[in-house]
Image (tube, coloured by chain):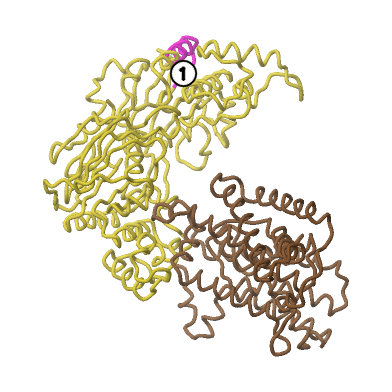
Amino acid sequence: MSQTVLEMRKVSKRFPGVLALHNVNIELRKGEILGVCGENGAGKTTLMKILSGSYKHGEYDGDILIDGKEVIFNSVSDAQAYGIEMVYQEMNMMLDASVSENLFVGKLPGKGVFVNSKELHSRSKELLRRAKLDINPKMTVRPLNSGQMQLLSLMRACAKNPKIFVLDEPTSALTDQEVDTLMEILEELRASGVSCIYISHKLEELYRICNRVVVMRDGEVISCRDIGDVEEQLLIEEMVGRKVETLYPKQHHATGEEVMRVENLSVPHPNIKGKNIVENISFSLHKGEILGIGGLVGAGRSEILGALFGQFTKGVKMALYVKGKKVSVASPKDAIGSGFGFVTEERKANGIISILSVRENMSLASLRNLPRRFFIDKKVERQRTQGVFDRLAVKAPSLETKLRTLSGGNQQKVVIGKWLLNNPDILLVDEPTKGIDVGAKAEIYKLMGDITSRGASIIMVSSDMPELIHMSDRCIVISNGKITGEFMGIEITDSAVMKAAIK
Amino acid sequence: MMEKTMNQKGNGVLARLFNRNEVGTLLPLLLLCVIVGSVNKDFFAAGNLADMLRTTSFSFLIAAPLTCLMITGGIDMSIGAVTSLGGVICASSMVNYGAPIWVAILMAMVAGAIVGIIKALMVVKAKLPGFIITLGLMYVVNGAILIYTQGLPITGFDKAFKVLGQGHVFGIIYWTIIVSILVGVAFQILLSTTKFGRSLHAVGGNEETAKLAGINVDRTRFIMNIVVSVFAALCGVFMASRFNSAQPSIGSGSELTIMAAVIIGGTSMLGGTGTVTGTFLGCLLMAIINNGLIMMHVTSFWTSFIFGTILIISLFIDKYRRSKNAVS
């Protein structure tokens, strides 16, 4: 029996309003690669942040034991001192420093204040050879592509000779060949007694390299088994299985009439040069319909909405038809003119202006609809915004209240109100109830039903499975840049969507 | 969690008046007047007050449009240089090319617009960092002026030209005061009642949100950048008239004090908030400090020290104001 090198016992972590981890127990053995899988929001990243020392002792409940002894991490360097190394999805390279400086950042070989360049160079070359990276250690990192950078961040961690390696979605930017290289490196590490936690939603990779696999869901560990003992279908069911809540309106108002069609939509990848995050997809939207878009984070769903709205235009290719007529969208102004509205994913980043009032936020997208050319008819503005304010039941002292004082749910209502003032035919929404409490969620769902009952249509991106399942009339799933599934009505199920999302 | 809105603190007109942000500038201003006045009664002499207002009007002419620019989050270190440029171009047109006054003024404004366009292309289109670029532009324009004038002032204007900077109505109200107040009122109306003004606040408050709401962010910032430079040049024209000569470095150093006046008046460097009324008070405060020091027979060496102290204090006040209104 192999010995236990790491144990996380009864770990719980609470954030305001949500329990991110509940009584999590993890056991990692020497020379093992332990896979961890789960949906967005299952708690995987939070757990790893606790292990890596990002959340220090006291910020969570539970214990961490290394080789059977309890340890306390007050910082990331404490965890590193015990041989725990993280390789995150964000690569954190110093773009203008050399490859070898990045590989040995913080641990440059040499005596005192001097750097031993010869040793730095030779050790870098050795690491690059192992990663099959044919690059000069002296060159800067900036011109490298994401795959190379990801391998570099892996080797950077290797250079520290860790006992416990934690990899979070390590292959997101890698080509198939680079994935093979990664697997070889992991095999070597395993053979030399290093243990590894491998977080990934790519089940085929877990089957390829892991000894055991842990499934997490809603902050809890659902199961932990030898990889050979479990079928993929069961893993999916465990990742997704959830109690159904009754906060969804029964109404569905989809008609057969097409209100929008997009063909051959391609959107460039925001992080990887030369690659498209979404490649040549086509879909349509019907009047009164709520079209859900499912898929994993990073699959390109938000980029689809952004492209339709003119938020992204560089490198975007699409043929867009609204109510049968071809339209070109070179900016959000064009999209608005064609009848679109866009409730974005991060309202703080680009949905609200927190220092302005409710009224000023609400009227922001419809200023040109106010009478008079240059001046704002304040009376009309107040009337119209008051109307929407009342309809949406925004909880705020008055129209003049500054938006930053409102709760998330009410801020979201103001954002929706902003678009409603334009009477859009097509409302794009990205994670409509993200960070919003249950009460406000129900109100927003009711509102979406109300909007569609009046003849408008909604395209909704959502990572919240119940929301996606219960609100969508029809649902398409995006994976690897393509539409991997389309489901209608009762066909929209957790497992169907999940299966298509990881294809 | 709910902010006490201005309406809730007290309903009377007086209470509402006291809660406006400008009060933060008005009170120290009144205090200063009292202090200086008590040391030297001549502070309140009509002639002295008129002089102070005239000084105020020169900086206010630029500070008013600058307020709008800073509300969008922009900055302009080249205003002083463009002021000098305006004066030199206007003077040169009249003296070296015999142009009539109104043409010369137009030439100065065109020069300002050209600098404004170059600035806008670099800062807005090429998205280069505003502070550094306008700083560089300041050096370039100042250098160009020195090369052109060989460091010498241009004099020899028509008598008629004097009216602009030195002429007055009713004995003490200088034309520059009237012009700058009209300009100030215009910009305040722009800010608080027009769609363009709303877009200025939106761009400064959250550029991404503004863009997604259909506002042409680049165009808004482009326009504002040009307008500031045009008014800076116009101010140079007034200054040349006031001093009866176009000095190549008349504007040097004024960029910092004008920006300081705008900030003291309540405009935040982060953008999104600010009023022209507050800026007026800021300019007035600066003029009072300047004049007050002279009235109190304090050497002008104290000027920088006091300006700087007030500027730093006003940033603290700004931070305090922002945190008071923020949600935890």
x%, y% of residue B141? 72, 53
Badge 1 crowding class, 10 Å Cα cut-off, few under 14, some 14 to 19, many 20 or more, is: many
Residue A486 appears in which quarter of the rendering?
A: top left
Q: Which chain is yellow?
A: A
Q: Numbered disc 1: what chain?
A: A
Front residue of A425/A315: it is A315
On-image quarter of the C terminus of chain A: top left
- Above or below residue A25? Residue B283 is below
Residue A45 visible: yes
Which residue is the site of mark 1? A195
x%, y% of residue A286? 17, 46
Q: In the figure, is residue B27 to the left or right of A503?
A: right
Front residue of A240/A281: it is A281
Q: In the figure, is residue B37 to the left or right of A316?
A: right
x%, y% of residue B193? 46, 72
**Residue displayed at 34% across by 51% down:** A334
The three-letter amino acid code for the residue at tag 1 is: Ser
**Looking at the magenta stretch, what is its main secondary structure?**
helix
- Above or below residue B48? Residue B63 is above
Q: Which residues are magenta?
A: A182-196
Residue B254 visible: no
Residue A72 appears in which quarter of the rendering?
A: top right
**Residue displayed at 64% across by 18% down:** A138
x%, y% of residue A320? 27, 42
For mark 1, give the secondary structure.
Answer: strand
**Residue displayed at 24% across by 57% down:** A447
Q: Residue furthest bottom?
A: B170
